[in-house]
Image: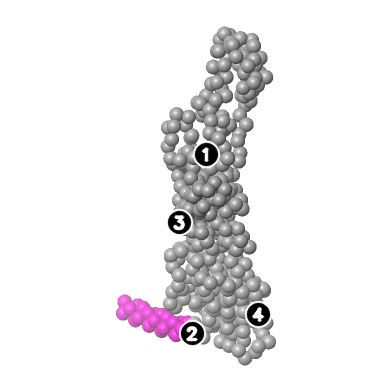
Amino acid sequence: MKSRGQLEDILTFFAVIFLILSALVYFVYFKTGVIPVYKPEREIKPAEKGIVPTGTFFIYPKKQTPYLFLKIANAEKLKLKPNKNIETYIYYEYPDLNNIETNEVRFRFEGKNIKDPNDRFYFMYILFPLDKEWQTTYFNEKYFYLPKGHNRYFLIVIAVNDKNEYDPSPAFISFTTKISPYFRDISIWPQGDKITLYINNYSNKEIDITNWKIISSNGIFTVPQGVKFVDPDFKYVKENIILPPYGRAKIIATSSPLGFSFRINKCFKFFLNLRNDVRKFVDFIPYYCKYFTNKELFDLRKQGFSINCLDFLRRFPCGPSFKDLDKIRNDSRCLNFIDSLFTYRGCYYNSINDKDFLTNYWIIFITTPTTTIYSPTTSKYLEVYKNLYETSYEEIKLYDNLNLLVNKYIYY
């Protein structure tokens, strides 16, 4: 038993000596840069942390091995040697790295050897958190196409010369892209009259644009709520404006004749017959038609409708004119039936449950501040709404409700 205890003590002593020597060797190699080490921060999330932790080194090689001597063997196998005379530089043209409003970023790399200016370099880089391993480029300019959204990144770059000598103190920067998850899903297109612009949803998803902001040299303007169903009985309910997939909105800097922004439906042709003051704001009017099948016409005949009425319905499926109505002016029942089909009220209540009742088109009114001007033509003072934008040397930006850039348009 005594000899066994002595053997355990001896083994423990040698194990302690081995660990101490390994730690010393590792410390020496680590400090001299022979052992490249990559220690990313444990929990770096986009748009949360902006500094590289103290003591973190971003150096080659690509793969890490779990034991000290295997790491040394791996470094020797790659035949890379540190050279403290090599410096790595990262150049960029962004005035604020914490506020880059695009997901297509560009950086330029440069390597210099203080003692040998003729050295030629390639570069190894890692973009955290997207890259999990080191990447290699033989160009001194690199474009990155990044995900949409408000994200923070760390870019670490190492210059390596043609003698396989690398910079043991790599260059690194952190930067943030501040763009909307809907970045460039929606386009912005001004009409050119300074008060009208269009936005188009090019995605296959619904996008809530309420409280989005239009920013120009003339100010900041907010997208309001609107009325989805323009009820003929004035039962209006305001709600968020949701742009449907591949939908479109026309934004106008004036007050709405209805008192609200609205979505166009398939019966709007008849609504505009009643409201000429609205017609001038509407570019697109659905062409509503009601085509009766033979069975439907036969069922109407069984309900007592005249043959003359049925022939009339067959000839004018898209709505008769007042002149056409003279042909059935004595048929009150037919006239009442046509009224239920080809008036806004009748069309609205007959069609509201149809899948295609609502179009993809919104008319949005933004009430901008007004100014008073004198009109020589009318000899009166007029209240004029402020322009949304100018048409020269102007940048119009669209931001979402989190103040992240969606898109922009520039007038030169």
Distance, label 3 to label 2, CA atoms, is 45 Å
Q: Name the residue under label 2.
A: 31
Q: Which of marks 1 and 4 is nearer the N terminus?
A: 4
Q: Is residue 60 visible?
A: no
- The N terminus: image quadrant: bottom left
Q: Mark 4 points at which residue?
A: 121
Q: Which residue is drawn at 48% across and 35% down?
A: 229
Q: Earlier in the sequence, mark 4 or mark 3?
A: 4
Q: Can you tell which of label 4 and label 3 is closer to the viewer? A: 3
CA neighbours of label 4 inside 10 A, class few (<14), some (14 to 19), many (20+): many
Query: Main SS type for the magenta part?
Result: helix
Q: Name the image quarter holding residue 331.
A: top right
Q: Can you tell which of label 1 and label 3 is closer to the viewer? A: 1
Magenta stretch: give its range.
Answer: 1-29
Q: In this view, does 213 lie to the left or right of 83?
A: left
Q: Can you tell which of label 3 and label 2 is closer to the viewer? A: 3
- Work out whether residue 192 or residue 226 is closer to the camera in this orientation and state it: 192
| Residues under numbered marks 1 and 3 in contact, where contact means CB atoms less than 8 Å apart | no
Tell me: residue 33, above or below residue 65. Answer: below
Q: Which of marks 3 and 2 is nearer the N terminus?
A: 2
Tell me: residue 101, above or below residue 316. Answer: below
Q: Can you tell which of label 1 and label 4 is closer to the viewer? A: 1
Q: Which percent across, then down, holds residue 222?
A: 47, 52
Q: Is residue 278 visible?
A: yes
Q: Mark 3 points at which residue?
A: 402
Distance, label 4 to label 3, CA atoms, is 42 Å
